[in-house]
Amino acid sequence: MRKDWANNLSVLFFGFWGGILRYLCSTWFNFNGTILVNLSGSFLLAFLTYFFISFKNLAEWLTIGLSTGFIGSFTTFSSFNLDIFKMLLLNEATAKYLLFYLSISIFGGLTLAFLGAFVGNRLGNRMGAAN
């Protein structure tokens, strides 16, 4: 029971900061803020997942807080869809930009997720071997 509370509070704490950071990025960078958070979040989630798998010395509440809380509230599929809808509705984007937005979000996110998994696994194994 105590472990559940620690995990829940961790998600709450880190989720707050992830949501604030996402809001600031969308305020500062408009539609490109969603691309920025989703691409960096793709890298970070894969990195942290594979780092935590390889380097198992971190507390569960911290891994859950960072992954589910921070990155879960930092990245958002709904903002991605809303931005596309706004661009179409407000005619604020050319067809080329919409294609770029979709392509970089999907393929860039996948590429960065693979890169994050690779770096996290390598770093976790290296740090685990050093201990």
Image (tube, rainbow, N blue to C red):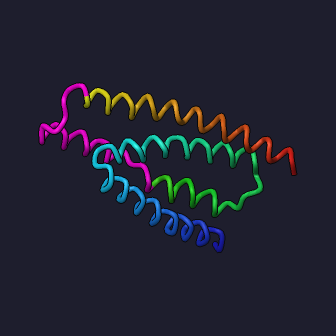
Choose between 33 and 3: the one closer to the eye.
33
Does 60 lie within the magenta span? no
Vertically, is 35 above or below 24? above
Q: Position of residue 73 (x, y in %)?
A: 43, 56
Asked where in the image residue 6 lies, by quadrant, the reply is bottom right
Q: In this view, does 61 lie to the left or right of 111?
A: right
Outermost left residue: 90
**How many numbered circles does the render carry?**
0
Vertically, is 84 above or below 60? above
Q: Position of residue 36 (x, y in %)?
A: 41, 44
Magenta stretch? 73-96
| Residue drawn at point x = 57 percent, y = 32 percent | 114
Q: In this view, does 51 lie to the left or right of 26?
A: right
Query: For the N terminus, which image quadrant?
Result: bottom right
| Residue drawn at point x = 32 percent, y = 54 percent | 28
Q: Where is residue 62 in the image (x, y as percent from the top left)?
A: 63, 62
Q: Where is residue 33 in the image (x, y as percent from the top left)?
A: 35, 47
| Residue drawn at point x = 13 percent, y = 40 percent | 89
| Residue drawn at point x = 69 percent, y = 49 percent | 52
Asked where in the image residue 95 lies, by quadrant, the reply is top left
Query: Magenta region's main secondary structure?
Result: helix
